[in-house]
Image (spheres, rainbow, N blue to C red):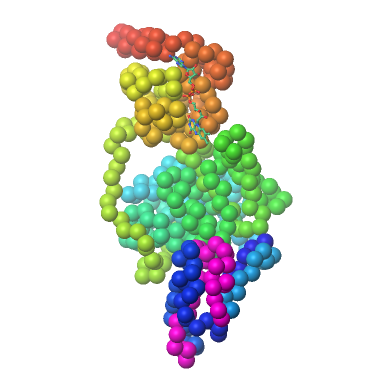
Amino acid sequence: MANSIKIINEKCVGCQMCAKACPFNAISMIERPEQEHSKKFMLASIDLNRCTYCGTCSQTCKFNAIELKKDVPMTSIDKSLYKGVWVFAEQRHGVIHRVSYELLNKGKYLAKEYGTTLSAVLIGDNIKSKAQELINRGADKVYVCDDPIFIEFQEDPYSLVFSHLIEKEKPEIILIGATDIGRSFAPRVAAKIKTGLTADCISLEVDTQTRNLKQTRPAFGGNIMATIMTPEHRPQMSTVRHKVFKEVQVEEGRTGEIIDFKIDAKTIINRTKFLGFMKDESICIDISDADIVVSGGRGVGSAEGFKLLKELADLLGGAVGASRAAVDTGWIPYSHQIGQTGKTVSPKIYIACGISGNIQHNVGVNADIIVAINKDSSCYMMQTATYALEGDLFEIIPNIIKEIKSCKCN
Ligand SMILES: Cc1cc2nc3c(=O)[nH]c(=O)nc-3n(C[C@H](O)[C@H](O)[C@H](O)COP(=O)(O)OP(=O)(O)OC[C@H]3O[C@@H](n4cnc5c(N)ncnc54)[C@H](O)[C@@H]3O)c2cc1C
């Protein structure tokens, strides 16, 4: 079921009462179409992206010029028109985000299961030279939207060009990284093209009979895994966090099609102004990319305690992570948080110091080996770790540091 609302042009007298009454600023006054120029007054126009179908405008209008229909059956779309798996190839300053290679890996699998092609979409300025990289990573086609307006990421231009391209080409599945860019951009695109979006998926599988994508993600605070489908709409859109899937291998010399997609920059209404780009200099090694992560929780006890973890991480060439408990108390910045509301890590070794192993934390840990250091041998982290070291972390870690230093000296 859906709602519909429209202005009946013949009845609208341009009195502006509806625009003044609308609590969501969804109505503005526009010029009448040319064929109605005999009527001198303006015409009300509803922005459906803002309208909540609350009915205030239709109740206010004295001329019955607004037709609101609630819960009308949806006209079903022709799903057979939608073909292909797409990956949004996120880039910043010409560097493709590695999550794009991970999505291409999953995309390649999905395209095979669906018996279709895999495409990447590259939006940026002076970016076309990067298209071959995406072909080498498995894309059969790369759509390139190359224009100076896309030099820095901004929601309006990016979501507009992407939604225009989707409407033209009609892909069946779209995968986007759940990065800062993806998280602000994907919902806008989904709203523009009126389809569903499943955020932060950790698994994507195919229902070959219905061609519905089974999108699994944590729900209810991470206590259950929910599998979500988009049976009535196309395309099916999912975001996936960095490091959830493995990167696709490079195949040098692969061939593919590079397709330019142009949009008249004058038609883009950009509501934000780009002022400048400031890099976060506090992060030496990004925990998402580190092979070794030494992570601390409430058991670390203080910001001072994290210095011990940093010393161990530095010796091992790793990065420092944290549980939300440690971040919330202000011992370490949020950029180090691992888990459902933090980052996902997939290091070779994850050393969990004073972390009990709640589901909301563990969902962000995708490690080959887990070493737990904890006083409580019964906690989940100790029970599930590859190696569990029972005891006080302030006794165990200095001993490990001493051992490593003596090995390095010899
Ligand atoms: C919606 C939602 C989202 C969330 N998102 C996240 C998230 O993204 N990331 C996250 O981490 N959490 C998240 N949480 C919080 C999560 O549920 C836990 O509360 C949190 O992970 C607990 O952190 P902890 O293990 O450090 O603390 P605790 O559970 O308090 O565990 C501390 C551990 O330290 C041990 N310990 C204490 N002193 C020492 C010592 N000296 N030596 C050795 N061991 C010691 C204790 O035995 C204990 O096991 C979320 C919660 C909700 C509801």
The residue drawn where x is 40% and y is 70% is 267
Image quarter (top left, top right, bottom left or bottom right) of the C terminus: top left
In the image, is 182 to the left or to the right of 6?
left
Q: Magenta span has 47?
A: yes
Q: Farthest residue in the bottom direction?
A: 38
Point out residue 207 in the picture as x, y percentages from the top left corner: 68, 47
Point out residue 247 in the picture as x, y percentages from the top left corner: 48, 39
Front residue of this view, candidates 277 and 96 = 277
Q: In this view, does 331 lie above or below 118?
A: above
Point out residue 301 in the picture as x, y percentages from the top left corner: 39, 19
Point out residue 81 in the picture as x, y percentages from the top left corner: 62, 63
Total number of numbered labels? 0
Q: Magenta span has 190?
A: no
Image quarter (top left, top right, bottom left or bottom right) of the N terminus: bottom right
Q: Is residue 281 above or below residue 53?
A: above
Determine the image quadrant of residue 55: bottom right
Task: Determine if residue 197 is in view.
Answer: yes
